Image (cartoon, grey):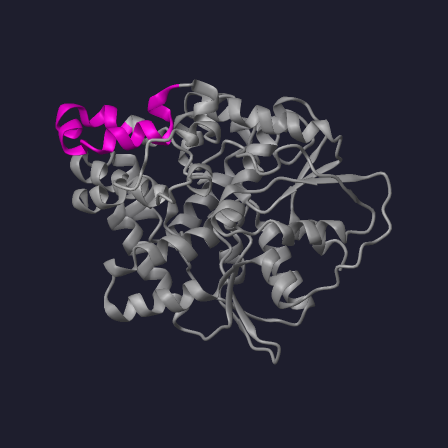
Amino acid sequence: MLMELDDLLISCMRCGFCQSVCPVYGETFLEADVTRGKIALLEDLAHELTADAEKVNQRLNRCLLCGSCETNCPSGVSIIDIFLRARAVVAGYKGLGLIKKTIFRFVLPRPRLFNFFIRISSLFQGPFLKKQSEKPGAFTSPILTPFLGRRHIPKLSNKSFSSIYGEIDEPSELGKVALFPGCVPDKVFTKLSDTCLKVLRHHKVGIYLARDLVCCGIPALASGDFKAFVELTKINLDLLAKSSFDYLVSPCATCASNIKENWHRFSDSFESKQSSLIEEICAKTMDLTAYLVKILRVDLKPKASDNKVVTYHDPCHLNKSLGVSAEPRELLKSLPGYQFKEMPEADRCCGNGGSFNLFNYPISKKIGQVKRDNIVSVKPSTVATSCPACMLQLMDLLSQNKDDIEVKHVIELYAETL
């Protein structure tokens, strides 16, 4: 992997253009936090690891993996590829912590065990949560402050989406899609997953929902646990191979991006048969809003609007990774009862970044505050997005600022019109 990194690093010209687009550098102004600084570190990674592996790990993980630098890199450096491989090298050298190893290698590969933990947690979450407002994502947890800080969070669902529905395999003459909900829509925003089913069934599309789908693997991969990433991917491949389908769709931008890009990126780490299946699935993977607009060609005639304003936040993994930005906006502009207004810097990262938010919350919150200010500037009643992780971040920041603005997935708003 060190040799592979060397081959990837050589194309960086150290121009520093990444400084102008990196959300983390925009808050800290530290060269070590921008892509150019991290690449300088990686050029002598073997030496740096033996000198201070923990410091290297901390510097590499102060990155959102948002892809802003790669999208705007004039040299076309494969920056996300570099950082994912570098994290795998570091994790392989210094090892994973017990908690991460337990989650990635024991809990996530066992969805029924995962659902059981969520079920037990949901039953006893009441005494641990304190309501801050009537908004869905407006709870704090004083007892868990050492772990969660003062974040405003939503409640866990009483029962996961996957445990309610099990397996679904509904054929249709109009074709069939495999639905990949993702962990957050499955465990937290279960109504979103319900809504996806409602929308697909409304359009008479065949649906395949595999029983016991597991995490797409991005948390493990982003933490450098390449072994867990491969194992989770293999489990999902075996399940998806049980039925034929025309497209794989997801309401989670991160899941869709990880499947389409990272499964493909590391496909040579799998056996030949699995590698071929990965290529087949990657070619079929789409964001659900893109599927509705491009494939189903749903009715998008602008409807009469009233005073309710809706704006849209571009998730990094949807816009920068998959190039999907027009389709969600087309759906929003067709909503009756809403007027669509573009916020400033709609494609600016919200600061969540998955595990980045957990381990670098002060920086994550500062980045998110800029996004919150941009949202408020257009005075919307609702801010829509296409990523459940972004929804968590936006709920947190808007709730902490006592803004009376709903956070919804584009699919939820579209479903209200059906």
Q: Position of residue 50 (x, y in %)?
A: 12, 28
Which picture quadrant has residue 356?
top left
Count the numbered circles shown.
0
Query: Looking at the image, is 111 positioned above or below residue 13?
Result: below
Task: From the top left corner, tell me how far across and down residue 379 is, in percent.
Answer: 76, 30
**Segment tinted magenta in the rendering:** 30-57
The answer to which quarter of the image holds residue 172 is: bottom right
Give residue 168's position: percent from left, percent from top. Answer: 52, 69
Residue 10 position in % (x across, y down)? 25, 41
Please name the residue shown 76% across and 54% down the image: 334
34 part of magenta stretch: yes
Q: Is the stretch drawn in magenta largely helix, strand or loop? A: helix
Any magenta on residue 27?
no
Residue 134 in sight from this viewpoint = yes
Q: Residue at x 25, y 60 (%)?
A: 268
Q: Quadrant of residue 207?
A: bottom right
Q: Looking at this view, name the residue that lies furthest to the bottom.
A: 173
202 in relation to 221, above or below: below
The residue positioned 24% from the left and 58% from the top of the image is 269
Q: Is residue 108 left or right of residue 287?
A: left
Can residue 210 be seen at all in this image of the molecule? no
The one nearer the camera, 308 or 33, is 33
Of 76 and 168, the residue lying toward us: 76
Is residue 129 found left or right of 117 in the rendered image? Answer: right
Horizontal relation, residue 4 to residue 183: left or right: left
